[in-house]
Each structure stands twice: as structure tokens, then as C-alpha cells.
Amino acid sequence: MQQYFVSGKAEHFVTIKDEASIKHMFSVMRLQDNDKAVLVFDDRVKRLARVSDRLTHTFEILEELPDNAELPVDVTIASGFLKGDKLEFLVQKTSELGVHTIWGFPADYSVVKWAGTKLAKKTDKLNKIAQGAAEQSKRNRIPTVKLFEKTTDFLSSLSGFDRIFIAYEEAAKAGENSTLARELALLSKGCKILFIFGPEGGISPSELAVLESYGGLKVGLGPRIMRAETAPLFALSSVAYVFELMP
Amino acid sequence: MQQYFVSGKAEHFVTIKDEASIKHMFSVMRLQDNDKAVLVFDDRVKRLARVSDRLTHTFEILEELPDNAELPVDVTIASGFLKGDKLEFLVQKTSELGVHTIWGFPADYSVVKWAGTKLAKKTDKLNKIAQGAAEQSKRNRIPTVKLFEKTTDFLSSLSGFDRIFIAYEEAAKAGENSTLARELALLSKGCKILFIFGPEGGISPSELAVLESYGGLKVGLGPRIMRAETAPLFALSSVAYVFELMP
């Protein structure tokens, strides 16, 4: 069944205001009166609802649904700004894989520069992609996307995490493949994890030193070189495997 | 350093014949005499080589390199035919993540139909993508891509695996999240694993019954619904995490 995020509080009758949702509900899916959908409000509880009046875009809430599709740990993925539409790809796929927050930052080796209105537009686009992916994956919340214009703002956000992992290709080349699994085994549900990834050229040595001074642990992700937009999917899948599938 | 797969046996001097490799080496990368590259022949050993004559596209092999970037288990990913360029995406990303073989098959819910020359062309394109991704990921072998025109041929290939997993969304919905981790823990390096994924609409109930009769185990991959091209990346990442990063 189709799922939609609706901002606000769940009332018995709810009128949808968001134009994109209205379009998808009544033009794309062609919902009729009494057709059902799942609505998720700010409290992140899924609720079964039926169309009570399609002309005014009004639903009646029928019942709360118990299912929770959120990862039991909060994972933030920080990526250096990537070329082309790779951040769009990254946001869509990490949203399907359960990411909590996605950050982009201007890394030393980032080729693209975003600032001002361009950065705001990109952020807006990425948040819409996150919402669409979260709806399709039947999640209980929409991942937050934030692009940092300045490195200093990015660095001052590196507090409050239980672990900060820096994906560092040179660590993998040196055969460092045990830190991630060792550290994940020490963490518990409810913890906050940050993974930092470089752009296409990776993390620079001076960036690495700064990130380590903020408590970041450099980790290898195995013997194969992954593209900048692929490595975060591997890291997030590993966390989901450990916290959701392993006994 | 750039890596290239070269078909044949490693001799002391090797002349490159493959037009795509020649173009990448001497037009894109503009290799000059004495510039170095890594060449991987049919024996899957990486060798450091130097350009001994760029006009005749000849390299001199300098030494064998010990690094092995292959997953210690053979994973085959079988996916129902997917719409658009999603198989291209799947081949590129699973090649980065260490897949051994990629199969496509005409699933009950596959919308696209490929046969004859169209299927041959698609196969050729996908094999080229696998080669490019394997070179970029510094792998020791190129994953094989095969598209089955007939379901019967696909089914008759389902032998010789130590485990066959069927990614089944309904299993995940029913809370079945423990089979994959339990089974992976029982497997050892060197084993052969097959994962079967449906197309966009998933595996049909009758397909499931047939695949189970071939020994397939249905597994849930967690509480979030992943797109058809994303779920294989999650499965492969999980296997790599277990066999390469876990102690």
C-alpha cells in the first residue's frame, strides 16, 4: 500500500496540503473515495487511512500500525561534495538503506563548489529525493539532508556521536580491515554513528589529521576500491546487517 | 595506478590488442614510454608493467604483485530482468562490491523482454561495464555476466551452489530476519553462494515454489523495502562484511 509523509499532528480527519503529495495521490495513483493509504505524521507512527473526500483531499484515520522500519542505531553519512548527480544517487540509496542524516561538505578534493542559492536549491532537491525514497521504503521518518557551505560549520557539527568512522582508502590498502567490525561489536542499539567519506579523490592527508583530532577513527572497508558513491552503501549495509539481521 | 585486464598469458613483453584498452591507455591516460600500469592476465595475478614502446602498444612485465582483492567466497547475483538501465547500474555496483557472477533471467513479473540479438547486445554491454568496474576496483578477475533467454535454462543452472538464498519481501514483512545471518555463519571461505532477486514487482508465489524446490531458502533482508537494484548491493555488502571484515 502506498505511504505518504504528512507534516503535522494526526487528527481523526486530515486534509492534505502538500501539492506534491496531492498530485501523487490523486493524479498518479488516482485514489478514489474509500481507497486506503498509509500516512505518517510528525510522530513517526504509521496510520492506516481512507480517502473520505477526494475532492478536498481529506482522509479519515482508521488505525495505528505497529510496524517500525527504522534502523535501531542513528547513522549519519557525511560525504564530500560529489560531481554530477552522484549525491542524488547517494541520498536515494542511503535512504532506502536506513540512513538517519546525510551531510555533504566541501572537501579538499571536491571539484564542485556549491554556495548560496545553488546550495539551497541542491539541498531542497536532495530532501525531496530522501522523502520519496523513505516513502517507497516504508520508513517511519524522512532522512534529513544538509549541505555545509563551510568546512568550519561541518567540523563544529562533529560532536554528540558515539563513534566517528573515517573511510580511508590508504587504511584499506595497508590491510586495516578489523577496526570497523571491532567497534560495531562494542556499540548498542540507540547509539549515534557518523561515517565520513571523501569525494572522488578521497580524504586528503591534512583533512584526515583534522578529522582524527575530532575523534574520528580511520577504517578500511575491505580490499576493493569502491567509488565515492558506493562506499557509503557498503558501510550502511554493514551496520544494518549487524544491528538488524545478526543474532 | 591504472589497472587493465589483458586476455591471454603473461609473457615478458606483451603487446596489447584490445582496442578499448589501447584507447584508454594511450588516448585517455596518455601513457608514455616507461610509464607504469598494472596488467592482469587470465591467471588473475596482478603484474606491474612499464610501457616499452607506446607506438606498438607494448609493455614489459616488471614484477608480480601479491595483492588479492577478491571476495573469499563466490557470490552469484541473479536478478529478474529490470527496466531501463537498472541492470547496468546493478552490474557496475555489484562488480565494485566483489560479485563473482551476475545473471539476469526473465522473471514472472519482468516487464521487459530480451531475446536474440537484443539480448546478445545487452549482455555485451553489461560485460564491458563489469570489466570497467573491476578495473577501477582493482579486482583480480572480471565478473561474468549472463542473461538467460529462457527460464528453463536459468533453472537448470541452479546446481553446484552451497547455498541458494531467495530474497523474498513477504518473508521480511513476516519478520523473517534471521535466516541469512544464521546460514552465513555456517559457511566457510571458498564456498559458492547464489542470491536470487525478483524484478521491480518481486518474486511471484509460483516462482518462489519452483525456486524452493531447487533448494532455495527464502530470506528477509530487514524491515525496509529496497528497490530491486538496491537489495543485491545490501546482500553482497553483508557477505563481504562477514567474510572480509569480521574477526
Image: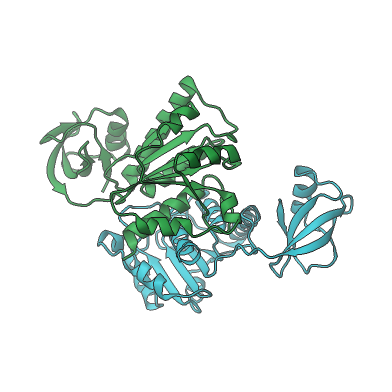
Chain colours: A cyan, B green
Frontmost residue, B116 versus B217 = B217
Q: Quadrant of the C terminus of chain A?
A: bottom left
To which quarter of the image does residue B126 belong? top left
Q: What residue sits 40% from the left and 33% below the top? A: B157
Q: Position of residue A6 (x, y in %)?
A: 75, 61
The image shows residue B52, relative to residue A166, as above or below, that is above
Residue B40, given in percent of the width and then of the height, sits at 22, 40
Q: Front-most of B63 and A32? A: A32
Q: Position of residue A97 (x, y in %)?
A: 53, 57
Furthest residue toward front: B213
Within the image, what quadrant is residue A99 found in?
Answer: bottom right
Judge from the rendering whether residue A12 lies leftward or rightward of residue B135; answer left or right.
Answer: right
Residue A231 visible, this angle? no
Q: Quadrant of residue A128?
A: bottom right
Classify A21 as above or below A194: above
Question: x%, y% of residue A57?
Answer: 85, 54
Residue B44 placement, left or right of B114:
left
Image point (44%, 75%), residue name: A187
